[in-house]
Amino acid sequence: MPGLVVLLSTGISTCSRALSFLAFVLFPALSASYPLPSCSNLKGGPQNTPRFLAETAAPSPPSRIRWLTDDVLFHYQRCGRRAFLDLYGDRAQQNPPSDYLLKLRQDSVTHRQQVFADYYPLYRPQFAPGDWVAGAKATLDLMADGVEAIQQGVLMATSASAGVQLVSQPDLLVRQPGWSCWGDWVYVPIDIKLGKKPKLDYQVMAAYHAYVLSRMQGVWPHAACLALRGGQTYSIDLPRLVLKLQTVLNSCLSHLQAATVPELFISHSRCDLCHWFSHCYAEAQSTRHLSLLPGVTPARYEFLKQHHLTTVASLAQVNPAQLAPLPGFGEQVAEKLVHQAQALIDNRAIPRSAPHAPHGFPLWPEDLPEGEVELYFDIEAAPDQNLIYLHGVLVVNHRTGETQFHALLAENHHQERRAWNDFLDLVHTYPYAPIYHFCPYEAQTVRKLGRLYDTPQRQVETLLERFFDVHKCITDGVTLPIESYALKHIARWMGFDWRDEGANGAQSICWYNAWAETGDRAYLDSILRYNEDDCRATYHIKDWLVKFSEPYWDRLYQTIG
């Protein structure tokens, strides 16, 4: 990888000094008074090899697991329940992968191949899938031979938990100058990730690779790196991440040896792509788990449990003033959570309070202006291609009672400017029409496209003055008996539905890729139907919210009059 050697060599002395100190404190076997571990022992060398504090404790009872792989440890960071079910659960209860997940996996494979292409020669150890001992032996032989780069080698070391082997499989092991049990060279691990940012869980895994590698080559690597999307290479702060790794690894080993599955917690941002989602979601629904309530974060859930508020019914009965002093709550959050539970129990919409407003309601008529013509706007994008390919606009003419949908399409990057200009021409045809959208993305994208295509800033800002975010109005004004304030959850509760049952934002990305690859217009037609339905759903929600607000606005007019 271009620039990699320079990156790894930068700050090596500082990193080495810091790791030496950590080794003395946390891993006494790395101090100068102890010999390096033997290279011949696949289980990590003699007992004076580097160990975490927990690994110096009294022997633990036999473990339920044999291999703690980097894959299990990675998923444990995101969800301990998933890691547990992956080891002990009934795989017949797993969801099949969605089209979007299959796309992400293929994108990840493509990204890895692009990174691997920068290394030649590249050696890959040969072993049967799952035969970690054979894989570690083959990798050890390659390292002892001093090959330049190893693709997906297997690193292995013993754990303090009886019978548990730590298994690490970094995407790359790259030879660098230095001293190890092999001679005048060391290996540095590189993990290839599809993300654009060095997320903490990525960094912890890079530290895990470095730790297990140190047990095999007898010395800490100079660095541990992430090869991210877009050609970025990130060298982690290894001394700091080793401390974090110690906590994660010991916690993981402890939780995975428990006799019962960890408590579930539904978080749609993390759970939706998990193959255990349907299994966990069915259990959460059957028990009305509090994690199904919007606003109940893992941290807030712990505080609620401490106050014996573990059911929707118990939360619905509490006085919000009791919750407000809790860390991370406050008056608004406390009221919202209690109202959320009450709304779910009674299946009704509850207005948010606004004690300082003369009509006692947070929304004002100017928040949801009505005009003879109204526009409802939704964008579709291909984020992996950095392309805004569809501006969908539903024109609602209250004067004639007609609606018309406009699909302003860019079939490739070269047409993106034209689609943007077509959008500007359409909205300027109705200069006084309010433009409704759902969530900030559309307004943010308009600013982005305005800068990209040199649209005068004053023109863009004047246009944005006509934008009204329906999502903000809903969340500011009313509590609904739903699990999420996403467009589909809200609109479906209000009686609207999409023509294609499986349509969603992730699926639309897959449809676009399929259309681009095959030219089959059926995929494009699915996208256009989905986008039009999103616009109509936004219209449906806005219309419902206006009718819900009218009694409070009537009170306002009476107060003013």
Image (spheres, rainbow, N blue to C red):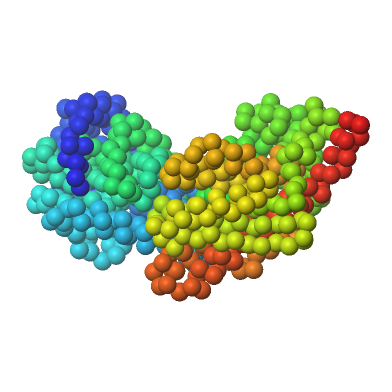
Residue 450 coordinates in the image, percent (x, y): 48, 43
Left or right: where does residue 213 sit relative to residue 261?
left
Q: Which of these two is toward me, 541 or 409?
A: 409
Q: Residue at x 65, y 46 (%)?
A: 431
Residue 551 coordinates in the image, percent (x, y): 87, 43
Q: Residue at x 62, y 68 (%)?
A: 501
Left or right: where does residue 127 sit relative to residue 94?
left
Residue 223 coordinates in the image, percent (x, y): 24, 37
Q: Vertically, is 57 above or below 506?
A: above
Left or right: where does residue 58 sit relative to residue 98?
left
Count of labels shown?
0
Q: Which of these two is toward me, 62 or 441?
A: 441
The answer to whether one can see residue 89 in this image is no
Q: Dividing the image into 4 quarters, which one contains the C terminus? A: top right
Q: Quadrant of residue 57?
A: top left
Q: Which of these two is toward me, 449 or 37?
A: 449
Q: Which of these two is toward me, 118 or 46?
A: 118
Residue 147 coordinates in the image, percent (x, y): 11, 52
Q: Residue at x 69, y 26 (%)?
A: 325
The answer to whether one can see residue 74 in this image is yes
Q: Residue at x 56, y 37 (%)?
A: 461
